[in-house]
């Protein structure tokens, strides 16, 4: 897997990662996000929240959408945005899982961990995104 970087107006480069179309996609996405956050000087307990949300967004696309195609990570003005693209057009729905269910809590976790989340229909499918407030280590010095 190779990551490509593109420049977004007024922000650090956007990391765009093609995802494998198999069960390794969440792990590949997590590792890419971990590396990106480290390169940006972002660490601390919030990073674990971002990594969990990354897994949930990719897994949700894998199980409920069309297979995830790519992950984008953008950091600007203290806000980290994760976007997972898949070719499906079905809209993600936040629903209350059954108390006895062992699954179906992915979007509940994203909702609880992220500052904001949602989806956007686009040409060829949709992005499901989550936003986190994260301060860079060098910004607090």
Image (cartoon, rainbow, N blue to C red):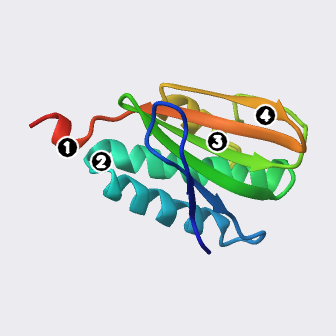
Above or below for 58 versus 9: below
Q: Nearer the viewer, mark 2 or mark 4?
A: 2
> Is residue 99 visible in this depiction of the protein?
no
Mark 1 lies on residue: 137
Q: Nearer the viewer, mark 1 or mark 3?
A: 1
Above or below for 37 versus 131: below
Mark 2 lies on residue: 42
Instruction: Give the label on residue 18, or none.
Output: none
Q: Which SS class for mark 2?
A: loop
Instruction: Give the label on residue 105, or none.
Output: 3
Q: Which SS class for mark 4?
A: loop
Mark 4 lies on residue: 92
Q: In the image, is 81 to the left or to the right of 59?
A: left
Near-viewer residue (63 or 17): 17
**Which of the 4 image quadrants contains residue 27?**
bottom right
Near-viewer residue (7 or 81): 7
Q: In the image, is 120 to the left or to the right of 16?
A: right
C-alpha distance separating marks 1 and 3? 31 Å
C-alpha distance separating marks 3 and 4? 12 Å
User: Residue at horizontal 38%, vertical 50%?
Assistant: 48
Q: Earlier in the sequence, mark 3 or mark 4?
A: 4
Q: Residue furthest left?
A: 141
C-alpha distance separating marks 2 and 4? 29 Å
């Amino acid at each position: 897997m190779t990551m490509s970087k593109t420049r977004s107006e007024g922000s650090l480069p956007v990391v765009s990662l093609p995802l494998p179309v198999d069960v390794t996609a969440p792990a590949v996405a997590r590792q890419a996000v971990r590396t990106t956050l480290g390169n940006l000087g972002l660490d601390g307990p919030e990073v674990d929240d971002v990594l969990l949300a990354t897994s949930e967004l990719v897994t949700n696309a894998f199980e409920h959408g069309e297979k995830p195609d790519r992950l984008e990570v953008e950091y600007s003005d203290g806000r980290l945005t994760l976007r997972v693209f898949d070719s499906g057009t079905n809209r993600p729905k936040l629903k209350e899982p059954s108390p006895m269910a062992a699954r179906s809590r992915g979007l509940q976790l994203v909702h609880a961990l992220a500052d904001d989340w949602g989806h956007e229909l686009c040409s060829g499918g949709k992005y499901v995104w989550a936003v986190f407030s994260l301060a860079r280590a060098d910004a607090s010095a």
